[in-house]
Amino acid sequence: MNPRFTVIKTHRIHTQLIRLVLLAVCAAFFSGCATVKQPLTGLVPGRGITTVQSSVSLSASSGERSSAGRGYLVYQAPDLYHLLILSPFGQTMLEAFGESDRFTCVIPSKQVAFTGLLSELPAESALKSLQLFRWVMAPPPLPVPGPLRQKVEIDGTAYYYDEIGMIERKVAASGDQVRYQGYQSLDGVPFPETIEIRSATGGEVRIVFDEPQLNAPVESSSLRPDLSGMAVYPLSEFKVM
C-alpha cells in the first residue's frame, strides 16, 4: 500500500472522529440548555390567588375504577369550589360543590343530589382525593435563601422546590401528596398548568387547566348548590365515580 495514501486515509479517519466528538459534545450541551428552566417574568411580589376560573381536563382513579373527561372549575380561596363535568356533547353530567369538608354532588339529568362530608364518600370513589383540595391550593411557604432544588419541612409537610424556586411537590405526614407542573405567569402570579393529587389511600385526580383566569370576580351563587326541587341523599350513597 502507498504510504502516502495510508497517511491521508488515517488523517481523514481522525478528522471524522474529531467531528463526531464535537457533534456529540454540542448535542449534549444544547440538550442540557433546553432542559434548564427559565425564571418566570412579570411576577408581582406578595400577590396570591383569590379566585380561579378555567376549563379543565380531568382524570380520576381509585383502585380499578377510573374516569376522564372535560369540565369547568370555579375556585375561591381558601376552600370554595364548583366543578362541572361535561359529556362529550357538552351537557352537564355532574356538578361537584365543595366548602371545607362538606361536599355535594348534583346530577342534573336525574334531579338528584348527594351531600355530606367528603370522608363519607365510599372508599372506592375516585373523587375522594378532592378532600385534599384546600390543602392543594394553599400557598406554600417561600423557599429559604440557599441552594436551589431545596426541601423545606413545616408542621409535618415536606415542600420540594424546583431550580427556579417554584413549588414542585408537597407531601403530608399522612402520605397525601400533590405535584405541580408547567408553571406560567398569570396576573403576576405563578400558576401550574397541571396539578396531580394522590391521596394516601391510592386515589388520584389529575387536573389540567386550559387558559385559566385568575383573581376575577366570582358570583357567590355559582359556588353553592341550588337543591330546590331535587331529591337529596346522603353522600355515602353516591356511587357514580
Image: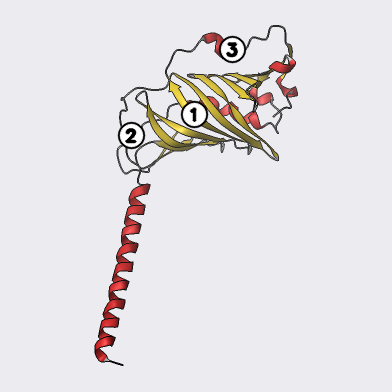
Q: Give the x, y percent position of residue 33.
A: 33, 50
Instruction: Work out which quarter of the rendered image holds the N terminus and state it.
Output: bottom left
Q: Do the residues bearing badges 1 and 3 touch, measured as CB atoms within 8 Å?
A: no
Residue position for label 2: 40
Instruction: Work out which quarter of the rendered image holds the C terminus and state it.
Output: top right
Kindly identify the amino acid type of the residue bearing the numbered disc 1.
Asp
Residue toward you, 170 or 106 = 106
Query: In terms of image quadrants, where is residue 42?
Result: top left
Q: Is residue 116 toward the left or the right of residue 145 in the image?
A: right
Q: Which mark is residue 224?
A: 3
Please name which of the two marks, 1 or 2, marks the residue nearer to the observer: 1
Identify the residue shown where x is 30% and y is 37%: 145
For the question of whether residue 155 can be seen, the reply is: no
Q: Do the residues bearing badges 2 and 3 touch, measured as CB atoms within 8 Å?
A: no
The mark nearer the N terminus, 2 or 3, is 2
Please name which of the two marks, 1 or 3, marks the residue nearer to the observer: 1
Query: In terms of image quadrants, where is residue 44?
Result: top left
Per the model, the C-alpha gap separating discs 1 and 2 is 19 Å
Q: Is residue 192 above or below residue 36?
A: above
Per the model, the C-alpha gap separating discs 2 and 3 is 35 Å
Identify the residue shown where x is 34% and y is 58%: 27
The mark nearer the N terminus, 1 or 2, is 2
Determine whether the residue tagged by mark 1 lies in a helix, strand or loop. strand
Q: Is residue 16 above or below residue 136?
A: below
- The extreme left residue here reads 4
Residue toward you, 81 or 160 = 81
Residue position for label 1: 210
Kindly identify the amino acid type of the residue bearing the numbered disc 2.
Leu
Residue toward you, 174 or 165 = 165
Q: Do the residues bearing badges 1 and 2 touch, measured as CB atoms within 8 Å?
A: no
